[in-house]
Image: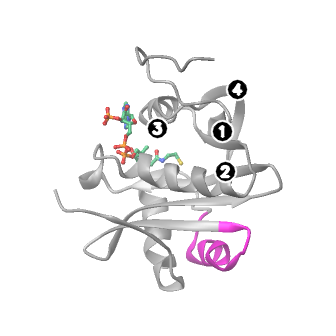
Amino acid sequence: MESYLLIPARLADAKRLAGMSQELVEAGLRPSWGALRIAWHIRDPESVVLTARVRSVAEGFAIMRYADDTAHLNLLAVNPAQRRRGIGRALIGWLEETARTAGTFAISLELRAGNMGARAFYAALGYRETTEVPGYYQGLESAVRMTRDLRTPQTTPGAPQAAP
Ligand SMILES: CC(C)(COP(=O)(O)OP(=O)(O)OC[C@H]1O[C@@H](n2cnc3c(N)ncnc32)[C@H](O)[C@@H]1OP(=O)(O)O)[C@@H](O)C(=O)NCCC(=O)NCCS
C-alpha cells in the first residue's frame, strides 16, 4: 500500500472534491456540494478542507467548519480503492486535534440514515447517534445526527480504563 499525506486543499482541488462528493456521498440526490461551494470552504477562514493524497492525488477529503465551542463536519469521503486503511480515521483525527487546539469540544455531523458503513465508522471513532431527522435529504432520505464530545476519551471495547 502506498503511503498518503494529509494536506489542506488548494482551490484547484475543488472540482475533483465536488466530483467525489457527488459520486460517494450524494449518489441519487440532487448535488448540493458543487465546486463553487467547496471552493468557498477552502477560502473560508472558519473552515478546514483537508485532503489525503496518494502520489499527490486527493483520494480522500473532509470539510469541517469551526464555531466557538462546536464544530460541524460537512463532508467526508475516501475513494473505494483506498478504504479500510485508516485514511478516514486519520482525516477525522487531524480535524479533531485542530478543534481541541482551538478550544472546540463538541463535533456534530449528519449522514444518510441508510449509510450503515459510515454509521459504523463514526461509532468506531467514538461518535454517538442522537436524533433522526426525517426527509432531511431533499425529502428522499432521513438523516442521522451524530456527535462526539472531545473531552470524552475514545474508548475501545476491551481496552483497559485509565485510573481516575
Ligand atoms: C466512511 C468512510 C469515509 C470511511 O473511510 P475509511 O478510510 O475506509 O475508514 P478507516 O479505514 O479509517 O476506518 C476506521 C474504522 O471505522 C470502521 N469502519 C470503516 N468503514 C466501515 C464499514 N464500511 N463498515 C463497518 N465499519 C467500518 C472500522 O472499525 C474501521 O477500522 P478497521 O478497518 O480497523 O476495522 C468511507 O467508507 C467512505 O468514503 N464512504 C462513502 C462516503 C461516506 O459515507 N461519507 C461519510 C458520510 S458524509
Question: Going by the picture, which residue comes out furthest to the right?
Answer: 68
The residue that disc 4 covers is 130
For label 3, being within 8 Å of ligand 1 is answered yes
The residue that disc 2 covers is 100
Crowding at mark 1 (Cα within 10 Å: few <14, some 14-19, many 20+): some
Answer whether residue 84 is visible to the viewer in this image: yes
Residue 59 location, quadrant:
bottom left
- Mark nearest the camera among 1 and 4 is 1
Give amino acid for label 2. Answer: Arg
Ligand 1: give its quadrant. Answer: top left
Magenta-highlighted residues? 33-47
For label 4, being within 8 Å of ligand 1 is answered no
Instruction: Measure how far apart labels 4 and 3 are at the Cα level.
Output: 15 Å
Give amino acid for label 3. Answer: Ala
Answer whether residue 26 is visible to the viewer in this image: no
Mark seen at residue 150 = 1
- Say which of 103 and 68 sits in front: 103
Crowding at mark 3 (Cα within 10 Å: few <14, some 14-19, many 20+): some
Residue 46 location in percent, x, y? Answer: 74, 68
- Say which of 150 and 26 sits in front: 150
Tag 1 secondary structure: loop
Question: Going by the picture, which residue comes out furthest to the bottom?
Answer: 12
Residue shown at the point (48%, 35%) measured from the top left: 115
Query: Which label's residue is closer to the chain start, 1 or 4?
Result: 4
Mostly what secondary structure, the magenta segment? helix
- Mark nearest the camera among 2 and 3 is 2
The residue that disc 3 covers is 118
Residue 99 location, quadrant:
bottom right
Instruction: Measure how far apart labels 1 and 4 are at the Cα level.
Output: 16 Å
Does the magenta run of residues contain 42? yes
